[in-house]
Amino acid sequence: MAKLTETKHREPLFHVVKRDDMPEWKAWLIRVITILVGFLFVGILSMAVTQKSLGDTYSIMFTGVFGRLLEGSTTMLWKYLQEIVILLCLALALTPAFKMKFWNCGAEGQALMGGLASIFCMIQFGEKLPYITLIIVIAITSILAGAIWGVIPAIFKALFNTNETLFTLMMNYIATQIIAYYVYIEGGGSNVINPVPFGNFPVVGNNDYFVNIAIVAVITVFMFIYLKYSKQGYEISVVGESQNTARYIGINVKKVIIRTMLISGALCGVTGMLLVAGKDHTINTNLVGGQGFTAILMSWLGQFNPFIMVLMTAIVVFLRLGVAKVADTSLLNSSFSEIIVGIVILMLVACEFFIHYSIKFRHNKKEVKA
Amino acid sequence: MKKLAKVLALCLAISMIALCFGACGGTKDQDDNKPELKVGFIFLHDEQSTYDKNFMDAAKAACEEMGVEYAQKTQIPESKDCYDAAVELIEVDGCDIIFADSFGHEAFLIDAAKKYPDVQFCHATGTQAHTAGVANFHNAFASIYQGRYLAGVAAGLKLNEMIDAGKITADKAKMGYVGAFTFAEVMSGYTSFYLGAKSVCPTVTMDVKFTGSWYDEQKEKEAAQALIAGGCVLISQHADSMGAPTACETAGVPNVSYNGSTVAACPNTFIVSSRIDWTPYFKYMIECVQNDKAIDTDWTGTIETGSVVLTDINEKAAAAGTKEKIDEVKAKLLDGSINVFDTANFTVKGEKITTYLADVNTDKNLEKDTEAIENGVFYESKHRSAPYFDVEIDGITLLDRNYG
């Protein structure tokens, strides 16, 4: 990012300067306004395309997310929460790595490997192990699988300084192919694995997703404390700010990189487990459905703060489900939803940019100098 | 401070507008308690996939014709999302019938059917209804092998024309086929296509390549190009993109298409296309629910029900007399004097087969469980609606295999 443009003979038309002077409340006010404007924009754009009134549009969006909540039905609310926690869990998993400036673009693959470990245990040990033991085995193997998939690029980064962005991306493709092959073996000719009735997370109070939501709630709090109050969390920040400073004050950078990616991968593995054991009870290459990449944005927009991430994922999932409903009701192409969500995310990113940087024009600058 | 006040005012104004619209919209959709029937459709993709578009067009047409309400959920993966979509269509939209269009939706739809015994669930291409024991869950398919057979006849006539014109010799009459996966639905399709061609052009042979995907334009194109380079003089396909048809148009090789006409993009090479028209089934299931009749556990659409149809023949590419010949063969299929998988018309490793156990009941080990040949005919779609013909017959060479 062009933070400072060097002044040569002639000053450029404008340049971007970092600003640290904006008070917290003002930054938040700008964010809230952006979100409101975003929602208004979504409504108006939908209205223009669907020829429905703005009120109807918001009403349909609300129904798409919460269903008949106003009449006392919570079914859709739980589904909404489930969608949030999956995206959130991936965002949480990426956060320690990003904070360390390790660009983990492999959440997709790490989660797939976690999911693969889950389904493998469910199929292989489902009938042999007692329920509790099975769940423990599923949890351990899924976490391990995700961690291993995450730590391989970290080891190469630490030892040979390879580019982790490319490495983690490539690992995604490998994971996808492994899943495809596994589905071929297990699914036989039909290319589909039927849901496995063993090792499924328990249904709590008639609710399929309660366990998933509870697990991610715990992880959210844990991650907040880990990043903010633990020594390891501090080491992550220092390595992220400057590896040289970290080395100077005696932090073993290699160790921190590897340890952090173990955690990042492990949490992605957990997400895979939540998707397989807690939701689908089967697997296919589309298990994560690209959310590993959306999570990157969620982590950034949440400014590496788990609680802000909750808010951001809630907004993005609301838009995704709500606009999808608008599209389905008006028989629009489903890309409509993706376009809208994309635009709003872009608005949020732009908003963050203007909170942290300001643009100074040449003309202005002269005035200031004079 | 003034600036702040401005910003605050703007913020308040926007939120008021949003709130106001949100509030007045909240009460609108509650007056829909009239007892009209509503059908909810679950699609794997959207209209950009020819496979889903074929279902969507039929669904809208059937609902309009029957005067019932239509609701849809697109982009629903083959996961618990299918179950959730069904729940949403029932609880939020108030649907009385749920239909899903993809093979992998089946298990999740069965789960939903168990939860909502008063709602009827219909599923295309599935295989488990006859063994699941869930009364409100039903499978449907069509005897598309008959349509493929007719399309094969058109292909055979084209080959004959090439032979007569001296473009190729009779022993060089080789067709190419781009398939998605090496399993029964595709194998049944290309075999019936081949047998149709063979019924008019006895020397025909065929090469098959698989892409391992239902929709991959690039791979389908490459497969078609490889087949053409390998000496195939006519191409057909069972995959959903425009890959193979456009490769044929570029190379000037005749193409027999699937799922709908590709004549607009391929005016010089498109001969004819077979497809399943789902409108008759949708009308049937709506009628059943309207009249409180039970829907068949396994429903197989045929030429007779209007489920198996051919598009218009492209006179520019097709051989002369194609339409007349197809009508003649169609009549024979209808009166039963021709059976597509008559064992007299094909051999396996040089011998006629008299018995074949097909995998009809779904189980993990793909056990062969049902005798499919009776009176010298392999009866496809008799023991369940989805295809189960997976015999590899002489004359067809599988250049590769892809199970997904």
Image (cartoon, helix red, strand yellow):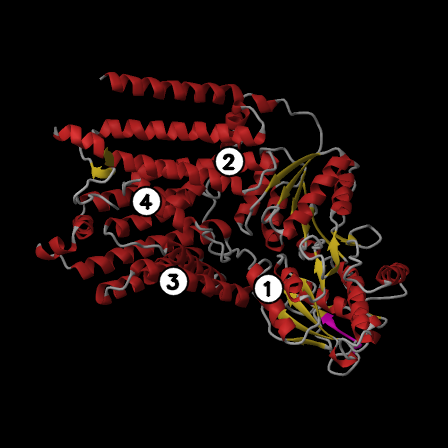
Q: Is residue B36 above or below residue B243?
A: above
- Mark earlier in primary sequence (2, 4): 4
- Asked if the residue at tag 3 contacts the one at tag 1, i.e. Cβ–Cβ closer than 8 Å, the answer is no
The amino acid type found where label 4 is placed reads Ser
Q: Which residue is identified by label 1?
A: B221
Numbered badge on residue A323: 2
Q: Chain of mark 4?
A: A
Q: Which residue is mark 4?
A: A299
Q: CA distance from mark 2 to mark 4?
A: 22 Å
User: Does B168 appear in magenta?
Assistant: no
Residue lying at 67% horizontally and 36% vertically, measured from the top left: B70
Q: Is residue A106 left or right of residue B240?
A: left
Q: Residues within 10 Å of mark 2 (few under 14, many from 20)?
A: many
User: Is there one chain holding both mark 3 and mark 4?
Assistant: yes
Locate residue A216 relative to residue B295 in the image: left or right: left
Q: Is residue B373 visible?
A: no
Q: Are marks 2 and 4 on the same chain?
A: yes
Looking at the rendering, which quadrant does residue A317 occupy? top left
Nearer to us in this view, A3 or A337: A3
Rendering coords of residue B278 (x, y %): 73, 48
